[in-house]
């Protein structure tokens, strides 16, 4: 049977190996955690850059849409202005025709 001293030495050796193994495992864990953190940081940076590009593309698309909408509104206003001018000319022509018709009608009444 081992003596107390041998058993203590054995336990000290086991404890030493355990401490070394734990230290090595902890070091590996810390290194892996740092690599994972760096990868995560890089992925977040890429995500933010992609999100910024998407936001910029959206802003440009909205600007083009607004410009196109403004051109369409302007074209519509011009078309409406032409329509109103044409309608006013038509109303004026109709009034003149009605005036001529009334004058002819009055002459016909006096004639008969």
Image: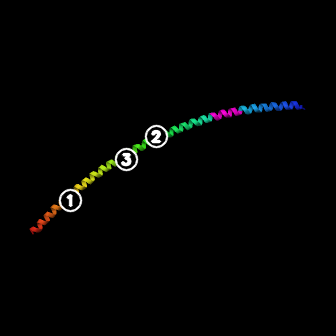
Residue 69 — which label?
Answer: 3
Instruction: Work out how far the residue at label 1 is from the one at label 3, CA to CA, in angstroms.
Output: 36 Å
55 vs 81, left or right, is right
Q: Quadrant of the C terminus?
A: bottom left
Q: From what the image shows, is residue 87 above or below residue 47?
A: below
Q: Quadrant of the N terminus?
A: top right
Q: Residue at x 12, y 68 (%)?
A: 109
23 vs 92, left or right, is right
Q: Which residues are magenta?
A: 25-34
Earlier-in-chain disc, 1 versus 3? 3
**Majority secondary structure in the magenta region:** helix
Instruction: Work out how far the residue at label 3 is from the one at label 2, CA to CA, in angstroms.
Output: 20 Å
Residue 101: x and y in percent read 16, 62
Mark 2 nearby-residue class (10 Å; few <14, some 14–19, many ≥20): few
Instruction: Verify whether residue 17 appears in magenta.
Output: no
* Element under disc 1: helix
Q: Which residue is mark 2?
A: 56
Instruction: Work out how far the residue at label 2 is from the one at label 1, CA to CA, in angstroms.
Output: 56 Å
Instruction: Verify whether residue 30 appears in magenta.
Output: yes
- According to the image, what is the colour scheme of the structure? rainbow
Residue 22: x and y in percent read 73, 33
* Element under disc 3: helix
Q: Residue at x 59, y 35 (%)?
A: 39
Residue furthest toward the bottom?
112
Q: Which residue is mark 1?
A: 94
Mark 1 nearby-residue class (10 Å; few <14, some 14–19, many ≥20): few
97 vs 62, left or right, is left
């Amino acid at each position: 049977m081992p003596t107390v001293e041998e058993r203590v030495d054995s336990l000290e050796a086991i404890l030493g190996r355990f401490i070394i193994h734990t230290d090595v495992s902890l070091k590996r864990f810390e290194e892996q955690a740092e690599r994972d953190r760096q990868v995560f940081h890089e992925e977040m940076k890429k995500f933010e850059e992609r999100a910024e590009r998407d936001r910029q593309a959206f802003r440009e698309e909205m600007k083009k849409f607004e410009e196109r909408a403004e051109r369409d509104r302007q074209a519509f206003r011009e078309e409406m202005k032409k329509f109103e001018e044409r309608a006013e000319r038509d109303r004026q022509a109709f009034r003149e025709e009605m005036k001529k018709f009334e004058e002819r009608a009055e002459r016909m009444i006096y004639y008969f």
